[in-house]
Image (cartoon, rainbow, N blue to C red):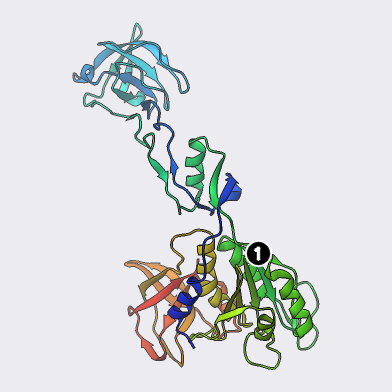
Amino acid sequence: MLDVADALAEILARVRPLAPGAARLGPGALGRVLADDVRADQDSPPFPKSLRDGYAVRSADCSLPNRELRVTSEVAAGVVPTKAVAPGECARIFTGAPMPDGADAVVMQEDTQPAGDGAVRITDDRVKPGQWVFARGTEMRAGDVVLAAGAALTPAALGVLAGLGLVEAKLHPAPRVFVLPTGNELVEPGHPLKPGQIRNSNGPMLAAQVQRAGGVATHRGIGPDTLPELLKLVGDELDGTDVLLVAGGVSVGKYDLVPAVLAELGVATHVRQVRMKPGKPLLFGTRGGTLVFGLPGNPVSAAVCFELFVRPALRVLAGHPDPGPTTVTLPLAEPIAEANDRPTYRPAKLEVGPTGYAVRPRPWHGAPDLRGLAAADALLVLPAGEARLDPGSLAQVVLIN
């Protein structure tokens, strides 16, 4: 049985980023990862521009209070100025407009008064060179690496790429994940329950976790606890997906058929059990380029194993340089006393207090209690043995949002 860190290392040692390719940029590329550096093709802004509505002036002309300057031109955004500003002159200018030659500062409209005869009075006597001017190349210079390989595309990053005029970029693809919940007791949502049955929560939950992790999930129903049907279901998907995610049937009971199915199909098993709670009967294997995860059937166990092991693998496939999971140390918001035979990952909630973040354990009744995980955004890590921690005690926390 492996410790969590050793199990994760075994998994990540067998994961490589998916081959990148040219992809269309737009909202659909959100979260995708750049495979190459993106460089600026020109300075941005390509000209010095005004940051305010007001007047483009020579700062040396504004050293005296109530100095009057003659307005000789007007420059709007998108218009190229044709007249330079000479001593004693200024130009009416608007936000985003190019600065005319000769001007080195902008005086805000609020710091001026009409003076008649086409002149304006400058009431700001502390005008400095560069005031309210966005100089050429302030944002980026031609040739600068604007976004480096490995950067995930955020809304701002997509805006930057649009500003560079790009309509496509070389991106790592989103991993394809086939989600297969198993169990004769499972019934899909929307169907009535018969005695002894429960609804399939693992399928929708894991598909959503895949999407949140940047993958594309496919879920075609429930796998029964029968060897021939599981062999066909799993065998049909192994070569057509990047990750096969099976939930349930991975322990050591009579109907836990998944390990035998995977062995029959030639999947090499690298991780079989992990010293953790919930989630001990985790299975990880590979066949060719396909990663195979067998997750426990209890929903919280499946969710926790996904966050600790599957999400990092998906991030590597998607080209992220840091696979995670993200772990921080935070003070407890309330006392906790538990005794566990294995390190335990307990649903918890982050809170903002007067001195910063703290973590509060969620009410939780164990691996089947998915409701206890629903409002959690973290996992509180409790060591094996007896844990008695007072409020303010520092604890390890895995972030899951």
**In the picture shown, does residue 164 fall above or below 265?**
above
Query: Toward the viewer: 66 or 246?
Result: 246
Please identify the quarter of the rendering in which residue 335 is found.
Answer: bottom left
Query: Toward the viewer: 299 or 7?
Result: 7
**Dot 1 lies on which element?**
strand
* In the image, farthest residue toward the left: 64
* In the image, farthest residue toward the top: 117
Residue at 53 percent of width and 77 percent of height: 304
Please identify the quarter of the rendering in which residue 387 is found.
Answer: bottom left
**Visible residue check, residue 376:** no
Q: Is residue 195 left or right of residue 369?
A: right
User: Identity of the amino acid at label 1?
Assistant: Ala
Number of marks in the image? 1
**In the picture shown, does residue 296 fall above or below 53?**
below
Give the image location of residue 227, x and y in percent: 76, 85
Residue at 44 percent of width and 70 percent of height: 350
Give the image location of residue 126, x and y in percent: 21, 26
**In the picture shown, does residue 263 fall above or below 315?**
below
Residue at 52 percent of width and 35 percent of height: 165
Task: Assess disc 1: are there few (<14), some (14-19) or many (≥20) residues with their C-alpha within 10 Å of its C-alpha.
Answer: many
Give the image location of residue 299, x and y in percent: 61, 79
Residue at 44 percent of width and 34 percent of height: 41
Please identify the quarter of the rendering in which residue 214 is found.
Answer: bottom right
Q: Is residue 199 left or right of residue 23?
A: right
**Visible residue check, residue 21:** yes
Residue bearing mark 1: 217
